[in-house]
Image: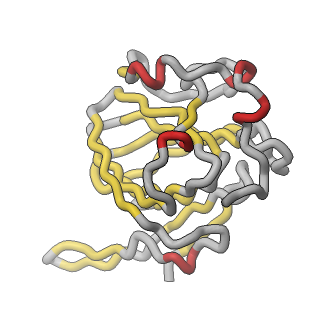
Amino acid sequence: MPRVEASTVIADVMIVIPDIYGDSRGRFIETYRRSWFPLGREMVQGNRSDRQQGAVVGLHYHFHQSDYWYVTRGRARVVLHDLRVGSPTEGATEVLEIGEHDDRGLFIPPGVGHGFAAVTDLTLTYLVDSYYNPADELGVAWDDPDLGADWGVADPVVSARDRANPRLCEIPDHLRPRHGLRT
């Protein structure tokens, strides 16, 4: 049975350490099961992101959507920041590496800012529990010094969208997620 552990840094973030079965033909890994996540809902959409080494994606957040990330190829340095007003870990930043070197999965609840840097070329698959909604696609500046994130990339390649995200101190109160609120 895989181990599902709560983050020690950010409330409601869950890390999956899967069981890996293999022989001379290859390997098998159960990467996701709905019952592992008490705060999760049924995942309704699966996505794939292929990135080249040095790419930085994020920091994104949602009011209504949870994500489940699993890197199938390469290595990602993940940055999480608890943006939820009233959360017991409000303002906490967590940095961890996931990928084919350890096969961990990551459950990210609504209101937790999330992004990643491609340490190597990588493929990230992610499941979400809400269909794409442009009104629920929000962001914080990936390089906001108030977040204290170490992306581990010397010369990052960042999209125009992510370069335009505001610093946390510039986000109006009505665009700040609240802990425990979700529809």
Residue shown at 37%/35% (left/top)? 119
Return the x and y of residue 136 as percentages of the image width and height: 56, 43
Above/below status of 139 relative to 73: above
Return the x and y of residue 61 as percentages of the image width and height: 58, 41
Q: Is residue 100 visible?
A: no
Name the quadrant containing residue 102: bottom left
Image quadrant where one finds the C terminus: bottom right
Return the x and y of residue 156 as percentages of the image width and height: 40, 20
Nearer to the camera, 28 or 92: 92
Residue shown at 43%/33% (left/top)? 57
Q: Is residue 67 left or right of residue 72?
A: right
Q: Is residue 13 visible?
A: yes
For the view shown, which residue lies furthest in the bottom direction?
1
Q: Is residue 77 left or right of residue 10?
A: left
Residue shown at 44%/24% (left/top)? 161
Nearer to the camera, 70 or 181: 181
Return the x and y of residue 178 as percentages of the image width and height: 78, 47
Name the quadrant containing residue 172: top right
Residue shown at 54%/33% (left/top)? 59
Give the image's coloring scheme. secondary structure
Nearer to the camera, 73 or 183: 183
